[in-house]
Structures are given as C-alpha cells and as structure tokens.
Image: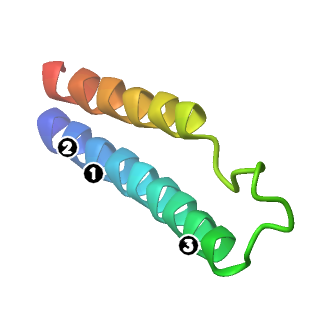
C-alpha cells in the first residue's frame, strides 16, 4: 500500500532527525561538563544552534505538508 510506505519513510526520517538532535544535545552536555579554558569561548555557538533548530522545524513542517 503506497500510503503505508510513505508513512514508514516519514517515520524513518523523523527517527533520523531525532537521532541527530539527541547527538547534538549530547555534544552540548559534554561541552558544558568541561569548563572552557577561556571564558570568552562558548562551547556552542547559539546562532548556529538556532539555525539547526530552524532547519529541523522546516523539515518537520515539510513532512506535515506532504
């Protein structure tokens, strides 16, 4: 059934996105455990993070529209 195949693909896509998000969160958590040698350097660039979130939102919106 074509519709079923689509929903399976969507689920796989979402799982991949979730996995990527979890990896990102893990990386951030690890970064925050190690104190930066220099106070000036942020372990994570907030702007970069926001861009990633926007990408994720766009992908999800795209999935919902299909």
Q: Nearer the viewer, residue 52 or 48?
A: 48
Instruction: Classify residue 1 as left or right of residue 9.
Output: left
Can you identify the residue that label 3 sits on?
A: 29
* Residue 40, x across and y down, in percent: 77, 49
Quadrant for the N terminus, please: top left
The residue nearer to you, when weighing 62 against 45, is 45
Percent across and percent down for residue 15 are 37, 57
**Dot 3: within a 10 Å radius of its alpha carbon, few (fewer than 14), some, or many (20 or more) residues?**
few
Q: Please tell me whether residue 43 is drawn above or below residue 27 in the rendered image.
A: above
> Residue shown at 19%/43% (left/top)?
7
Q: Residue at x 70, y 56 (%)?
A: 43
Q: Position of residue 14 (x, y in %)?
A: 33, 49
Q: Are marks 2 and 1 in contact (CB under 8 Å)?
A: yes
| Mark 3 residue element | helix
Most distant residue in the front direction: 39
Q: In this image, 3 relative to 52: left or right?
A: left
Q: Nearer the viewer, mark 2 or mark 3?
A: 3
Return the residue at label 1. 11
The numbered mark, 1 or 3, whose residue comes first in the sequence reads: 1
Residue 46 found in image quarter: top right
Query: Which residue is the site of mark 2?
Result: 7
- Residue 8 coordinates in the image, percent (x, y): 26, 50
How much space separates mark 1 and mark 3, taking CA atoms? Answer: 26 Å
Q: Looking at the image, is mark 2 or mark 3 earlier in the sequence?
A: 2
Q: Secondary structure at mark 1?
A: helix
State left or right for residue 58 relative to residue 49: left
């Amino acid at each position: 059934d074509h519709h079923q195949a689509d929903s399976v693909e969507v689920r796989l896509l979402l799982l991949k996105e979730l996995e990527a998000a979890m990896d990102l969160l893990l990386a951030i958590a690890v970064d925050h455990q190690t104190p930066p040698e220099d106070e000036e350097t942020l372990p994570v660039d907030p702007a970069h993070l926001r861009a990633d979130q926007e990408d994720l939102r766009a992908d999800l919106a795209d999935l919902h529209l299909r």
